[in-house]
Amino acid sequence: MAENSALCQPPTGGPPTTTQYFGKAYPAIRELAFARQLGERAVPASLCAREVNDEQRADYGYAPAFDALLKRMARTLK
């Protein structure tokens, strides 16, 4: 039951609710193995955004993943 999950435990404490406050994502083995085979051409990144509230932060949303991808593409185009 979702109400018993630690993911639904409010960050400020109290009993779990039906609202999910936390989440987890683990990299898939196949995708990481493929990235390893690509070597320096690979740009693995997290599926979970680190920061979702402050758009001014450098780690907002998927900005770090896109920055890494753009840097990698720029090296290829030189």
Image (tube, grey):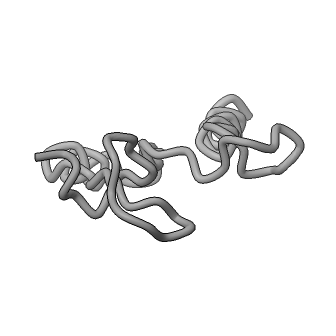
Name the foreground residue: 1 vs 28.
Answer: 1
34 displayed left or right of 58: left
Q: Which residue ends up furthest to the front in the rendered image?
A: 15
Name the foreground residue: 6 vs 55.
Answer: 6
Which residue appears at 22% of the width and 43% of the height? Answer: 31
16 displayed left or right of 72: left
Q: Residue 67: x, y in percent?
A: 70, 41
Q: Which residue ends up furthest to the bottom in the rendered image?
A: 13
- Judge whether 6 appears above or below 21 on screen: below
Q: Which residue ends up furthest to the right in the rendered image?
A: 56
Q: Residue 36: x, y in percent?
A: 28, 55
- Judge whether 15 appears above or below 72 on screen: below
Image quadrant containing the C terminus = top right
Q: Residue 57: x, y in percent?
A: 83, 50
Name the foreground residue: 6 vs 15.
Answer: 15
25 displayed left or right of 34: right
- How many numbered tags mark residues here? 0
- Judge whether 19 appears above or below 4 on screen: above
Q: Residue 4: x, y in percent?
A: 18, 57
Name the foreground residue: 32 vs 4.
Answer: 4
Which residue appears at 56% of the width and 67% of the height? Answer: 12
- Judge whether 74 appears above or below 3 on screen: above
Which residue appears at 22% of the width and 57% of the height? Answer: 5
Which corner quadrant of the image does residue 24 belong to? bottom left
Which corner quadrant of the image does residue 60 belong to? top right
